[in-house]
Image: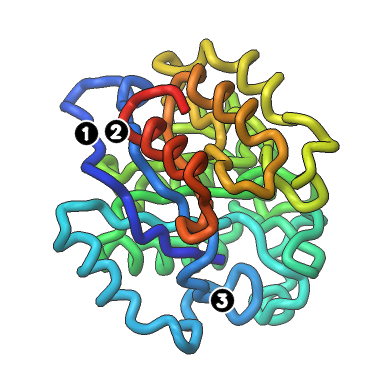
Amino acid sequence: MVHLVPLLRGRHRRRRAGEPRRARRARPARRRRPGGRRLESGHGEWTRPRPGFGSLPDVVAAIRDTGRRAGIWLAPFVVGVDSDVARTHPDWLVGPAGHNWGQDLAGLDLTHPGVQGYLADVLAGLRDLGVEYAKLDFLYAGAVPGPRRDDVTPVAAYRSGLELVRRVLGEDAYLLGCGAPLLPSVGLVDAMRVSPDTFHEGGEDGSHGLRGRMSLEARAWQDGRLWTTDPDCLVARPSFALRAEWAAVVGAAPGLRSFSDRVAELDDWGMDAVRRLLTGGVP
């Protein structure tokens, strides 16, 4: 499953020869687009264009023409059990990986040559289009328990899959992990989400509190040591009851800076908070 991230401000610094990956830092200003280019007919099928979106190569080219780096959101290690991939290649599946987007999910066997070839082909296609930034979500699916083609631990299988992603997208690609086993990812991603989603369905009124705050603050030490930390995005829309409190938490946290609100839905407070965040201030 792939979503295009069409707006990235500035360029991420390329790693110098011999520099540890953990020291790579992203420029702070970034807007996430959770919806956009969806290339799947079923979750995990990434090569079929969505009608009405237009040309992916043209969009990537337009982003790059502005001096920005085009980015992609994708969940490379998981497929929907109702997808053509799952039905055609049941031997590619390991075990249950949760439920989302209205269907049950399954983790892919990252030791299977068919899966490896499929991932390599899709990722190489994105790379050749000029995509240089990838948010890799639902990565835990690569480490779910279950039988695999090779007799390896789930963690070893997961790390082999992440190594494949890095190898295909290249050393200069900026990789942001999310929903990932943390320690097995060290050395293979440039940034890592260190908290759960703060704004989520059912929690818009603030009744669930700031569920990302504890883990974010507990893992802040990882920034600049293991990777650049991602505290989750600022949520500045008026419908989020805890937006001011969350803005203070995000502003005090190290690492990436991003927001995912539709600009048209922001009021004056929300616009000011976003501007302060993306210019290095505290919302």
Spatial distance from mark 1 to mark 3, Cα to Cα?
31 Å
Relative vertical location of residue 68 with respect to residue 222 in this rendering, above or below:
below
Amino acid type of the residue that numbered disc 2 sits on in the rendered structure: Arg
Q: Residue at x 20, y 35 (%)?
A: 14
Q: Residue at x 25, y 42 (%)?
A: 172
Q: Is residue 234 visible?
A: yes
> Which secondary structure lies at badge 1?
loop
Amino acid type of the residue that numbered disc 1 sits on in the rendered structure: Arg
Which residue matches tag 1?
A: 13
Which residue matches tag 2?
A: 27
Spatial distance from mark 2 to mark 1, Cα to Cα?
8 Å
Do the residues bearing badges 2 and 1 touch, measured as CB atoms within 8 Å? yes
Q: Quarter of the image for the N terminus: give it.
A: bottom right
Q: Is residue 257 left or right of residue 114?
A: left
The answer to which quarter of the image holds residue 45 is bottom right
Q: Is residue 151 visible?
A: no
Residue density around tag 3, few if under 14, some if 14–19, many if 20 or more, within 10 Å: some
Going from the N terminus, do you reach mark 2 or mark 3 first? 2
Relative vertical location of residue 217 with respect to residue 269 in this rendering, above or below:
above
Do the residues bearing badges 1 and 3 touch, measured as CB atoms within 8 Å? no
Q: Is residue 263 left or right of residue 21?
A: right
Q: Residue at x 22, y 30 (%)?
A: 15
Do the residues bearing badges 2 and 3 touch, measured as CB atoms within 8 Å? no
Which residue matches tag 3?
A: 40
> Which secondary structure lies at badge 3?
loop
Residue density around tag 1, few if under 14, some if 14–19, many if 20 or more, within 10 Å: few
Going from the N terminus, do you reach mark 2 or mark 1 first? 1
The answer to which quarter of the image holds residue 195 is top right
